[in-house]
Image (spheres, rainbow, N blue to C red):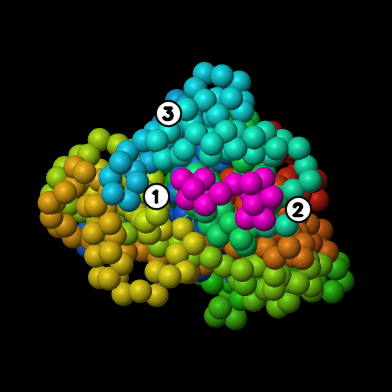
């Protein structure tokens, strides 16, 4: 019997994870991607002859599904993972200090790391230890900023710990994220043992991961936007997809692995496929500033800079730094030359080894819709739709995680599992 044919629309991590699992389960999978690139919001491209990521991506030790996916596509050797949580933090004028997990059970592994942290006064350290303890016990209502204020966290601790770690983790100001979401990250990453908070990143351009995952599917169609779905009246099912040239392609099942606005466009209206209306997702931008200088290797993997637009700096190679600006609403529309110059001035001030250095070249990558934050009233749907052979996936769906690579992979795995069950296939590999 011929294998069931599945169309996966969207070649971001969610679509790739769904496609990979469905292909491994014996389906004939075709991947349709609007862009000429694979990887969606986690991709890379060439600027002036140099391949750069569209934005620096990091993951943590607790991102178990993302790591499992990387392992299954055979790319584990191309990610670097810290042995334990270890973050170098500079003040804006160049005072360096480290937060480094110590060998104690959680949360003391982290509390212990604050002992030598120079950017916090003793009373703030003690309060922070109490706040970390309080995060283990619900309720946690309202915004994260409100929750922190309730636990007496003051401006000093906000600027030296909470903002540098939680704005990038959630890509939104602490006032906009729910306490529940932030405390999920806090508990999963920081209070879950020393392994969970380890930072990791890819050592090759991100698009390589996407390309490797896509090798598993039968056919990949790039620059192939899907404009709609076709339905079988007799069977009450989806029976294919419509391409932008009006052509209909028949499939036994479809995964829509798209961000909320894109999904609404392809489905016509999300409620038509049994989803809640998707107008409660607010996009937040990320801007990355790539700087090449004449000082060679500085000798750190990454570092945070307090009170600075730089936020986090990654040393991507000798003389190549990438500054990742989360919640970058003030920078997303700024001319590239101005953003680069501002970052370069900041970086020279914060990193003593760069005093007097020369900027050789720069580039700015920006994504106005880097992540989607659901409004408190927005229900996040799971993979299921009102059609048994149509599933959705995407980092914004109900995976329990904020909009991250981990969430994208989890959603793809869930969509594949749902369709495999509906089509009566062999089980998806656990
Ligand atoms: C600059 C930046 C930095 C980030 N940093 C981090 C980080 O450090 N850690 C982390 O975990 N996450 C990070 N993220 C978020 C992470 O990249 C996303 O959560 C994840 O990649 C989303 O994957 P996805 O597959 O759900 O969606 P997407 O990647 O958006 O995939 C959707 C795909 O569908 C395609 N598409 C859209 N419409 C159509 C159509 N009509 N037909 C066919 N295809 C279509 C799109 O082109 C896209 O490829 C970052 C994102 C950005 C942009």
293 on left or right of 429:
left
Q: Is residue 354 visible?
A: yes
* Upstream in sequence: badge 3 or badge 2: 3
Q: Which residue in the structure is indicated by mark 1?
A: 306
* Upstream in sequence: badge 1 or badge 3: 3
Q: Report the number of numbered marks.
A: 3
Q: Is residue 53 above or below residue 376?
A: above
The reply to whether the magenta stretch includes residue 152 is: yes
Is 204 or 356 nearer to us in this picture? 356
How packed is label 1: few (under 14 Cα within 10 Å), some, or many (20 or more)? many
84 on left or right of 17:
left
Q: Which residue in the structure is indicated by mark 3?
A: 116
Q: Calculate the distance from the C-alpha at mark 1 to the C-alpha at mark 3.
A: 17 Å
Query: Could you tell me what secondary structure mostly forms the magenta stretch?
Result: helix
* Upstream in sequence: badge 2 or badge 1: 2
Is 83 or 8 nearer to us in this picture? 83
Q: Which residue in the structure is indicated by mark 2?
A: 141
Q: Residue 216: image x %, image y %?
A: 53, 45
Q: Residue at x 46, y 58 (%)?
A: 326
Residue closest to the far front? 123
Q: Quadrant of residue 258?
A: bottom right
Work out which quarter of the rendered image holds the C terminus and state it.
top right
Q: Calculate the distance from the C-alpha at mark 3 to the C-alpha at mark 2.
A: 32 Å
Q: Residue at x 40, y 54 (%)?
A: 307
Mark 3 element type:
loop
Residue closest to the far top? 103
User: Which range is magenta?
Assistant: 144-160
Residue closest to the far bottom? 246
Q: Residue 389: image x %, image y %?
A: 77, 59
The reply to whether the magenta stretch includes residue 419 is: no
Asked if ligand 1 lies within 8 A of label 1, the reply is: no
Asked if ligand 1 lies within 8 A of label 2, the reply is: no
């Amino acid at each position: 019997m011929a294998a069931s044919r599945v169309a996966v629309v969207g070649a971001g991590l969610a679509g790739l994870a769904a496609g990979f699992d469905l292909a491994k389960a014996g389906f004939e999978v075709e991947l349709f991607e609007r862009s000429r690139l694979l990887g969606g919001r986690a991709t890379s491209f060439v600027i002036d002859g140099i391949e750069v990521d569209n934005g620096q991506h990091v993951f943590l030790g607790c991102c178990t599904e993302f790591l499992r996916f990387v392992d299954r596509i055979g790319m584990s050797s191309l990610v670097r993972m810290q042995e334990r949580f270890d973050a170098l933090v500079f003040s804006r004028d160049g005072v360096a200090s480290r937060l480094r997990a110590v060998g104690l059970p959680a949360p003391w592994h982290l509390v212990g790391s604050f002992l030598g942290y120079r950017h916090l006064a003793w009373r703030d350290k003690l309060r922070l230890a109490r706040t970390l303890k309080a995060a283990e016990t619900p309720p946690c209502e309202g915004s994260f900023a409100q929750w922190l204020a309730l636990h007496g966290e003051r401006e000093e601790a906000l600027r030296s710990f909470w903002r540098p770690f939680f704005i990038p983790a959630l890509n939104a100001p602490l006032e906009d994220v729910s306490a529940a979401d932030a405390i999920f990250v806090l508990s999963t990453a920081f209070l879950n043992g020393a392994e969970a908070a380890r930072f990791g990143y890819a050592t090759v351009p991100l698009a390589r991961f996407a390309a490797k995952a896509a090798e598993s599917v039968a056919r990949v169609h790039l620059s192939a936007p899907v404009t709609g779905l076709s339905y079988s009246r007799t069977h009450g099912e989806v029976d294919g997809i419509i391409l932008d040239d009006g052509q209909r392609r028949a499939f036994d099942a479809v995964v829509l692995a798209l961000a909320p606005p894109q999904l609404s466009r392809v489905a016509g209206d999300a409620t038509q496929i049994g989803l809640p209306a998707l107008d409660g997702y607010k996009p937040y931008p990320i801007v990355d500033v790539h700087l090449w200088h004449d000082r060679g290797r500085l000798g750190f993997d990454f570092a945070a800079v307090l009170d600075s637009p730089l936020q986090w700096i990654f040393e991507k190679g000798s003389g190549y730094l990438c500054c990742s600006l989360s919640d970058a609403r003030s920078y997303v529309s700024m001319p590239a030359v101005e953003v680069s110059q501002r970052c370069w001035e900041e970086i020279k001030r914060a990193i003593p080894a760069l005093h007097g250095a020369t900027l050789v070249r720069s580039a700015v990558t920006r994504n106005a819709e880097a992540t989607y934050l659901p409004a408190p009233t927005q229900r996040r749907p799971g993979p299921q739709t009102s059609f048994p052979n149509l599933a959705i996936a995407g980092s914004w769906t109900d995976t329990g995680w904020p909009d991250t690579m981990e969430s994208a992979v989890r959603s793809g795995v869930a969509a594949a599992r749902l369709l495999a069950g509906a089509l009566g296939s062999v089980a998806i590999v656990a």
